[in-house]
Each structure stands twice: as C-alpha cells, then as structure tokens.
Amino acid sequence: MNKKILLLILGLALANMVFADVSFSISFNSSETLKVFTSQYIADQTPAPVFSDTLIVLSSFQPGRQEFLVFGNIINGENVLIENGVWETKKNTLGMGFGKVLTIPVHLTKMGLEFSLDFSAGPYFHIFLSNHYTHVSGQYKREVETASILHRVQYGLYATTRLRLTHYKKYFNAVDFNLGLHFFMPFSNHEFNDDAKARYHLFKTFAFLGISF
C-alpha cells in the first residue's frame, strides 16, 4: 500500500478517535463455520475443523454515525482440511474496519436502567502477522505453508451488536460497560486454495465483554 494512503487512513482514524467514544473489548466465546461455495451447492466443510479464537477490538465510534475499529485475532485450528491434507494451524492477525453505526436508546423505567443499543456494519480486512502450520495427515502441499502475502490478506463485511449500560456512567468516570456480538462474513478464501471451482469461507461470531469511555 502506498505510504501516503496509509498515513491518510491513520490520520483519519486518529481524528475520528478524538471526537468519538472509544471502546475496548475482548471475546469470551466464539463460533466458527467453514463453508464451501460451488456453482452447485453451499455446504459446511466436512469433517468440521475445530477453532479456538480470541478477538481483541479497539473501536472508535460516534453513536448514530460511524465507527473505526482495529482488531487482533489469536487463532488455533485443529483438523483443518486444506488441499486434501489435514493441518493444525496457529495464527495471529491484525485488521481494520470502517462502518456505519445505528444507535437506539433503551429505557427500563421500572428498573431505573438506561442502555444504548448500537448496531454497526461495514467492510474490514486483516492480514496474518504469523502463520504456522503442522501437517497431520493426507496430502502435503508446500504452497499451503509458503503462500504469498496476497493469500494472507482476508477481507469481507463485519457487523457488531453492542449493548452499553449507560445509567451508571456518571459513577464510573464516564465508563460504559458493554456486552455484544461481533460477526465476520469473509469474501476471501480462508486458506490457500488451488480449486477454481470452489471457495472456502470461514464465518466467525464472537461474544464479547468490554468498556467504552
């Protein structure tokens, strides 16, 4: 990426953070589904791989307006079928996203509680900072481990639902407590893929806890 474009993106992100709320969250549960797309069918990959993911997100958002987020994902995969071979994978990723925010105030008058419910969605991309493979069984293909940087860029759409407890904000130095879901819908292949007739997309959903201030 051109350095000037990268600096412009970072400058816009910093400007957005100055005039916005900042949220930090970490996932406590994740669900992953690897789907196979062909011209004849869409189905879950079998045998199903097992992933253990932790997602950490720093989000700068303006309620009812826009959101800029930076996120990291720590991934461990077992029983991952790639190019007719079974692999174990370990990855660390760094990504960015930019989306639109819809905010709905929620009042529970009888309980004396006030919430804000945020829905945000937009494009994202991320790159694997580290990408480690252990071949377990089946066909070994060297390209799986040595794929170029272009095969390490993942992109798609994200969506977030975030419930912020705002009622006690004045008691905790302007801090909100958050509970929500992050969802990632990829448009790119999850791993190296030589099959021109099929695509492999890994859908992820994370439940998270966080704070915003």
Image: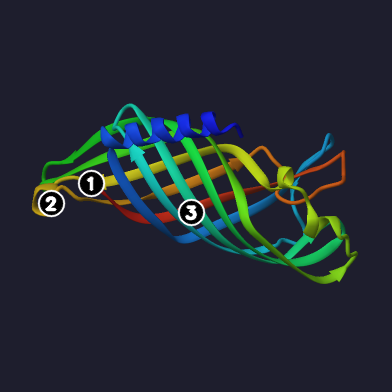
**Image: 114 above or below 62:** below
**Image: 7 above or below 180:** above
Q: CA distance from mark 1 to mark 3?
A: 21 Å
In this rendering, position of residue 18 left or right of residue 26: left
Which colour assignment does the render follow? rainbow
Q: Quadrant of residue 195?
A: top right
In this rendering, position of residue 37 left or right of residue 157: right
Who comes first in sequence, dot 2 or dot 1? 2
Report the front residue among 67 and 116.
67
In this rendering, position of residue 196 left or right of residue 33: right
Who comes first in sequence, dot 2 or dot 3? 2
Q: Nearer the viewer, mark 2 or mark 3?
A: 2
Element at label 2 = loop
* x and y, in percent, of residue 196 in the image: 87, 39
* x and y, in percent, of residue 90 in the image: 64, 65
Contact, CB < 8 Å: mark 2 with mark 1? yes
What amino acid type is highlighted by mark number 2?
Answer: Asn
Element at label 3 = strand
Mark 3 lies on residue: 206
Mark 1 lies on residue: 213
Q: CA distance from mark 2 to mark 3?
A: 28 Å
Q: CA distance from mark 2 to mark 1?
A: 8 Å
What amino acid type is highlighted by mark number 1?
Answer: Phe
Mark 2 lies on residue: 173
Label 2 packing within 10 angstroms: few (<14), some (14-19), many (20+): few
| Residue at 46% over, 29% down | 8
For this orientation, the residue located farthest to the front is 3
What amino acid type is highlighted by mark number 3?
Answer: Phe
* x and y, in percent, of residue 4 in the image: 52, 29
